[in-house]
Amino acid sequence: MRALVSIIAVFTLFSCSKEELGPQCIACEENIITNINSSDVIIINEGNFGFGNGSISIYNDSTEQISQNVFQQNNGVPLGDIVQSIIQYNNKAYITVNNSNKIEVVDLNNFNSIATITGFTSPRYFLPINNNKAYVTDLFSNSIQIVDLITNTISNSISTSGWTEQLLIHNDTVYVCDMTNDNLLLFNAQTDTFVDSVKVGKQPNSIVKDQNNKLWILCDGGFNETAPELIRYNPQNRTIETTFTFPNLSNSPSELKINGT
């Protein structure tokens, strides 16, 4: 599989009129890109809700140049409304576009479109399970969508109750952050069936796995409801080992990341 390209998500939130927005980065030079290198940085620009101005930028670390609106440049159409997340798998990039209710599949070498997966309600995060299928969490559908990676269509779904966020797979079990019910949900990745739920902190939003195969779950605490928490979970015996509590109730941490060490 192709070496991973670095990804940065840029989220902007500000107040302005529609006339003030216009095209992103009006003064930027539109460096046309025909080939993406493994050392390049993919930047996802979320855009403004309802304006359809989400985009992808590519930063070349060698030349220190940035190419704007790469998806639109290469495919002749805008990417869509609210670029939520991106995952690289089998030399493809799967771009989840939340308010456009779709996932764009592109060739990771040049960002040419391969397919558009539609039929979602409000997709959030994409997780490849194997070469044939992936899971997609959702804000409003009360389900996790199962995507057929051969046909690039939704093949089935798993019922949930409310908003699901980030997810990961470990030893044929998929772990899903259940924002609505403050749970870590466990599903069998082979049978696509519910296994168990574990009560964690308020509103778990992101999850990572460390080098010791322990899972870390970040809970934002809700809207000043309770203190945010970082939880270490042992998937082997399904127990919470450690809970780190943030000192400030007004903190709202999200997007937990981890490095290789």
Image (cartoon, grey):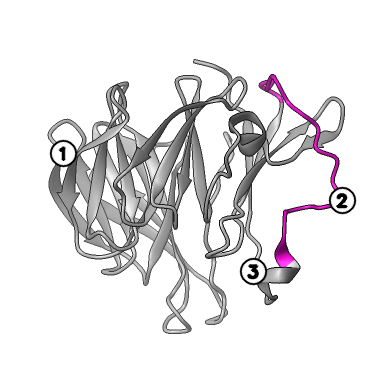
How far, Cα to Cα, is label 3 from label 1? 36 Å
Kind of residue indicated by mark 1: Asp
| Residue matched to label 3 | 13
In the figure, residue 6 lies in which quadrant? top right
Measured as percent of width and height from the top left, residue 222 is found at: 42, 76
Comparing 164 with 204, the one in front is 164
Q: Is residue 88 left or right of residue 142?
A: right
Left or right: 173 in relation to 63: left
Using the numbered discs, state the Cα–Cα distance from disc 2 to disc 3 in whole angstroms. 20 Å
Q: Are marks 1 and 2 in contact (CB under 8 Å)?
A: no
Q: Please report the residue visible at 25 percent of the width from the left and 59 percent of the height from the top.
A: 141
Q: Nearer the viewer, mark 2 or mark 3?
A: 2
| Res 214 seen here | no
Say which residue label 1 marks.
192
At x 32%, y 21%, the residue is 131
Residue 45: percent from the left, percent from the top?
64, 50
- Say which amino acid is labelled 2: Ala
Residue type at mark 3: give it: Leu
- Dot placed on the residue nearer the N-terminal end, 2 or 3: 3
Q: Which residues are magenta?
A: 21-39
Mark 3 or 1 closer to N-term? 3
Circle 1 crowding by C-alpha within 10 Å: few under 14, some 14–19, many from 20: some
State left or right for residue 220 relative to residue 134. right
Residue 36 can be seen in this image: yes
**Mark 3 nearby-residue class (10 Å; few <14, some 14–19, many ≥20):** few
Q: Which residue is mark 2?
A: 27
Q: Label 1 to label 2, Cα distance in Å?
A: 48 Å
Above or below: residue 257 compared with residue 37: below
Q: Quick one: SS at disc 2?
A: loop
Nearer to the camera, 37 or 222:
37
Residue 229 location (% of width, % of height):
45, 67
